[in-house]
Amino acid sequence: MRSPSFLVLAAGMGSRYGGIKQMDPVGPNGEFVLDYSVFDAWRAGFNKVVFVIREELEEPLRQHFAGKLEGRMQVDYVWQQLHDLPAPFVCPPTRQKPWGTGHAIWSARQVLKGSFAVINADDFYGAQSYAILSGFLSSPQCSDDSYAMVAYRLANTLSEHGTVSRGICRVDAQGLLQDVAERTSIEPVAEGARYKDESGNWQPLSGEEPASLNLWGFSDSIFSKMEPLFKQFLESRGEEEKSEFYIPSVVDSLIKAGHCRTKVLNTPEHWFGMTYAQDRDVVVNRIAALTQKGVYPPRLWS
C-alpha cells in the first residue's frame, strides 16, 4: 500500500483565542504547534501534507515551511472557499463563516488519493497518536468502508482555563465507534469531570470516557460518501449564516446507514491546544518539557 497522506485543517479563525493561533510561536526556536504535528506525522511515515487554509494564510505558511519539508514530505495548499459547493448549490451572498470541518475535508478532494489522516492545525496530538494512526492507514484494515478515529482519555484533554466541548464516544465490544455525543461546557472536577446538559444542569463524567479530538483516518472513498450528506445539509441549512457541516456528523450518519465501520484507536497521549489565550503558557511549558526529555530536538527541522 502507498504511504498515507496528512490533511491539516488550518482555515479556522481562532475566535475564542483572539488571534491566528495556528501561527503563534510556542517552541524553543519559534516553532508553531503545527510544526510538531507535521514533524510527528513525517516520523510516523506520512509522505504528503495538505494544508486546508484561507487564501491569506498561504504565503505566510509557505515562507514558514520553506526549506523544511523538501526531501521529507510532498506539500499541497488548498483554499477552503465558501463558493466551493456541489451543484446546484450556491453560497448565500451574506455568508461569511466557513462551512465547517466536513467542508474543509471535502475541499481537498482533488489532491488526495488513497488513505489519509485529518487533524486540526492548532491541536497537539502527540507522537504516539500519529504512529498508531499511520499503522492503521498503511494496513489492509483501511479500506473503502473501514475508517478510524484516534480517541483520547477525556481527562487528558481538558483545559485549565475554561470549559471545553468534546465528542464523547460510544464504542462496541469490537472496538468500533457507535456514535459521538457532543458534550459542552466540560470542566475538570475532583471526581473526574462534569458537563452542562441542554437544561443547564451539571452532569457527572468519570474522566475515563474516550473523547474525539478530530483525529481521523479515512480512505479517499470518504469524498463520494460525504457529498450526498453535504447536499442534504445545504438543502436544509444552507441559508443559515452560521450553520456548519461537521465531520463527526458525517461519520455518525455513515455508521448509522451501514456505509462504513470506524475503528476506535486509543492513544495514551495527552492532547493539548490553545482554545483560550491563557492556554498558550501551558503549551509552551509542555513542549519545553518534551524537548528537554528528548522527545523532540531543540530545532525540529535542522
Image (cartoon, rainbow, N blue to C red):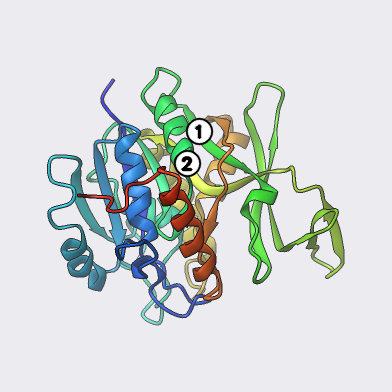
Quarter of the figure that contains the N terminus = top left
Relative image position of residue 214 (x, y in whole percent): 51, 49
Identify which residue, 44 or 57, lies in the foreground: 44
Q: What kind of residue is marked 2?
A: Trp
Residue occupying the point 68% across, 68% down: 163
Q: As drawn, which residue projects farthest toward the front?
A: 292
N-term-proximal mark, 1 vs 2: 1
Left or right of 44, for residue 260: right
Camera sees residue 231:
no
Give the label on residue 148, or none: 1
Mark 2 residue element? strand
Residue occupying the point 48% across, 38% down: 129
Q: Is residue 207 above or below residue 281?
A: above
Mark 1 residue element? strand
Identify which residue, 162 or 257, lies in the foreground: 162
Give the label on residue 216, or none: 2
Relative image position of residue 140 (x, y in whole percent): 40, 17
